Image (cartoon, rainbow, N blue to C red):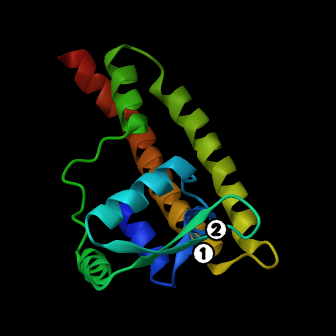
Amino acid sequence: MSTRHIILGLLEAGPSHGYDLKRRHDERFPQARPLAYGQVYTTLQRLVRDGLAQVEGTDADGGPERTLYRSTDEGAGELARWAGEIAAPAPFVANEIFTKVVVSILAGGDPALYLRAQRAAHMERMRELTAVKTAAGAPPATVLSADYALNHLDADLRWMNTTAARLTTLTAEVDAS
């Protein structure tokens, strides 16, 4: 995730305060880790330093002084360039689930037991995400995010099912070596 580009994207809607950018990020990317305020302000300072954003002004509105930021033409160009870049598929895919299954096989553990438990955890998360996306009035960003996560969980489940079906062969190969 590129916080720099997300902030630039949020600024495309118009000038904003850091507080509003953080709030909009958390609304638009509901399944992502929320941004810390410090991360938002540090990113804004770097964008200003790099000429991709600028300070539009400050106001107090009876409270603490707030700085208003806006994207520059250079920032809009940088955002367009980044958004158009094709994300390279990962050359190697190894995640924690894969690693635990391999280590369990190598160490003489019970990978089938682990896979059943992991499958149950995935299914529970899928139920939660389905409830979130089908809730009345779910914002489009929430539905989109939940669909993305559900598809990844589904891919994990398919891999777990394939691996569970191959455990006897995989374990025999390790035992033979």
The picture places residue 133, in percent across and down from the top left corner, at 70, 70
Q: Nearer the viewer, residue 3 or 90?
A: 3
* Residue neighbourhood size for the residue with mark 1, other residues' Cα within 10 Å, grouped as few (<14), some (14–19), many (≥20): some
Q: Are marks 1 and 2 in contact (CB under 8 Å)?
A: yes
Task: Place residue 18 in its image quadrant.
Answer: bottom right
The picture places residue 44, in percent across and down from the top left corner, at 42, 62
The answer to whether 177 is drawn above or below residue 72 in the figure is above
The residue under label 1 is 141
The picture places residue 7, in percent across and down from the top left corner, at 44, 68
Task: Place residue 26 in its image quadrant.
Answer: bottom right
* Helix, strand or loop status at disc 1: helix
* Helix, strand or loop status at disc 2: helix
Say which residue appears at 50% left-offset and 51% top-offset. Answer: 157
Residue sitting farthest toward the top:
107
Say which residue appears at 26% left-offset and 76% top-offset. Answer: 78
Left of 86 or right of it: where is 34?
A: right
Say which residue appears at 75% left-offset and 64% top-offset. Answer: 131
Q: Nearer the viewer, residue 14 or 92?
A: 14
